[in-house]
Image (tube, grey):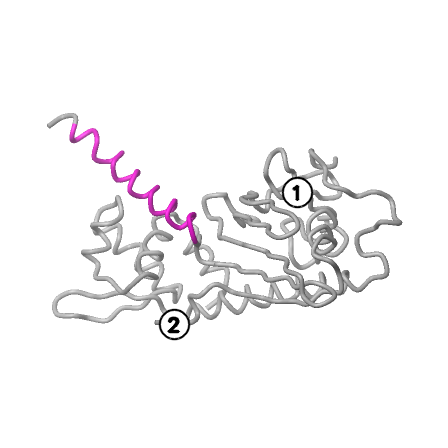
Amino acid sequence: MDVGTQLTALADPTRRAIFELLRAQPRAVGELSSKVPVSQPAVSQHLKVLREAALVRSHPVGASRVYEVDGDGLLVLRDWLDSMWDQALDAFVDAAHRPDPVGETSPPGGPSPNPLP
Amino acid sequence: MTEAIEPIIKTRSLPLSVEAAFSLFTENMSTWWPFGTHSVGGDAAVRVDFDLERRQLIETTTDGTTSVWAQIEAWDPPALLALAWHPGRSPEEASSLEVRFEPEGAGSRLVLTHDGWGRFGDDGHRLRANYEQGWDLVLSPYLAAA
């Protein structure tokens, strides 16, 4: 599973809403359909995309299926974000240890009201 | 449940005052951010600036192309920066990023919290409220015709 597939799965606003609902607690398809403004077949299609991205998984309960967040699958995206922030923050800490980190003796670089050209 | 769904929390100790740490993180972000591996423009990205009028964090490349990384949700120097983080994506896909600076010994500490899968706190409620509003918009023509 790759991060790009997972980010694409979460890009759709209805799928994000479904994912947020499952994040709160596992839910059956019928309950999810009652909480998002799309048809049940559309909800099932969104769940398929989320399942194929290893973001959710399901198990049968009676005649229904109950969906929940896939913690193992989510680790792909989480590890990527975790690593990304480690790299960015390590660069920040390196800069914090420079002799003149906020450039008080360098050319000015303060906040700009408009982006530089 | 699972810990994988919890927000990412990162802490770093800094040999700077909270004021200098906030300043370095924000006003001087271009002097340290690893653009090559962490940007929209890749190797062409050369600046990233907080635009306080537009309330946005904006990347600029060598040929002047800009892209918005985030909406500024809170700007409270030197203690708090909160962003709706969406580099390379639309604002609707933003996730919640919060950076706090706290005094620690002779220096300070940065605490970064990133809820990579959604919006925490009030923003989470706003996200859900948008979907309820969407349902009302779908229903209203039927109600009017009833």
Closer to us: B122 or A92: B122
- Picture quarter containing residue B117? bottom left
Say which residue appears at 24% left-offset and 55% top-offset. A32
Residue B144, horizontal then vertical, whole percent: 16, 26
Circle 1 — which element? strand
Residue at 43% in and 52% down: B121
Find numbered disc 2 in the image and state the secondary structure of the residue it sits on.
Answer: loop
The chain carrying label 1 is B
Circle 2 marks a residue in which chain? Answer: B
- Residue marked by disc 2: B2
Identify the main secondary structure in magenta: helix
Query: Could you tell me how far apart the alpha carbons at marks 2 and 1 are, in whole angstroms?
Result: 35 Å
Range covered by the magenta-colored residues: B121-143
| B140 is within the stretch colored magenta | yes
Q: Is residue B131 magenta?
A: yes
Estimate how packed mark 2 is, as few (under 14), some (14 to 19) or many (20 or more) residues with alpha carbons within 10 Å: few
Amino acid carrying mark 2 in the image: Thr
**What residue is disc 1 on?**
B50
- In the image, B64 versus B51, the foreground residue is B51
> Where is residue B129 drawn, in percent x and y?
33, 43
Residue A64 picture quarter: bottom left
Question: Tag 1: residue type?
Answer: Phe
